[in-house]
Amino acid sequence: DGGITQSPKYLFRKEGQNVTLSCEQNLNHDAMYWYRQDPGQGLRLIYYSQIVNDFQKGDIAEGYSVSREKKESFPLTVTSAQKNPTAFYLCASSIGGGAQETQYFGPGTRLLVL
Amino acid sequence: AQKITQTQPGMFVQEKEAVTLDCTYDTSDPSYGLFWYKQPSSGEMIFLIYQGSYDQQNATEGRYSLNFQKARKSANLVISASQLGDSAMYFCAMRPLYSSGSARQLTFGSGTQLTVLP
């Protein structure tokens, strides 16, 4: 089955620690995205990648880093510079190009700070 | 820049009845797409329906239809024959159709929590 997987489902971070959230897709989509969702709010874009080895900052990129070494994978690292990382993180992908570029989402990772 | 406004934080509907979830938007882009997503308590965002700004007809997808009024800048979601499984958070989102880079990002509203009553 084609889809987007995210792991882990829950992640705990200690003070000063970097953690990495995994996102994998087998939809053969070119574009991938990372969003952050805080309680009772909509999604905000952290980073976006249109093709391998290329990515761009979204609205709230500070304290986060990404890589795109493979088309299928777009991991997100939450660094110690992100002072308020507790949130729900959603990864999405889209086929790239075209007028109707629907983004499809993974199941999400909930990050909590210890 | 785009902005999405969803003014109903919570809505209740009786099972089997229809419900309308409001969405208004603001954009300077001449061409744009409007999307509705459903987020159940599990957290995953599920794509429901899409409307292009140039589409002459309102989009429909099963029990979902989009009441698109371009002059009013509104894109309300109508769910017919509500089911208990429709209880979820619903998000309206938009993006410009022909921009590049991060301008292609989706802009989301704050969502409406729909509860279907038995």
Image: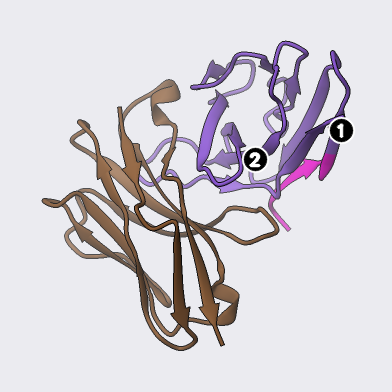
Chain colours: A purple, B brown
The structure residue drawn at horizontal position 37% and vertical position 75%, both measured from the top left corner, is B19
| Above or below for B59 versus A35 | below
Q: Quadrant of the N terminus of chain A?
A: bottom right
Q: Does residue A8 appear anywhere in the picture?
A: no
| Above or below for B73 versus B67 | above
Tell me if mark 2 has few (under 14), some (14-19) or many (20+) residues whose alpha carbon lies within 10 angstroms of its own: many
- Residue behind mark 1: A12
Q: Where residue B64 sits in the image (x, y, percent)?
A: 40, 71
- Which one is closest to the eye, mark 2 or mark 1? 1
- Residue behind mark 2: A90
Q: Amino acid at mark 2?
A: Leu
| Position of residue B54 in the picture relative to residue B5 (left or right) | left
- On whether residue A6 falls in the magenta region, the answer is yes
Q: Where residue B6 sits in the image (x, y, percent)?
A: 36, 51
Query: Mark 1 and mark 2 in contact (Cβ < 8 Å)?
Result: no
Chain to which mark 2 belongs: A
- On whether residue B36 falls in the magenta region, the answer is no
Magenta stretch, residue numbers: A1-10
Q: Where residue A70 sits in the image (x, y, percent)?
A: 72, 26
Q: Nearer the viewer, residue A100 or B15?
A: B15
Sequence-first disc among 2 and 1: 1
The structure residue drawn at horizontal position 38% and vertical position 40%, both measured from the top left corner, is A98
Q: CA distance from mark 2 to mark 1?
A: 16 Å
| Position of residue B4 in the picture relative to residue A41 (left or right) | left
Q: Nearer the viewer, residue B111 or B80?
A: B111
Q: Where residue B101 sits in the image (x, y, percent)?
A: 43, 21
| Position of residue A29 in the picture relative to residue A19 (left or right) | left
Question: SS at mark 1?
Answer: strand
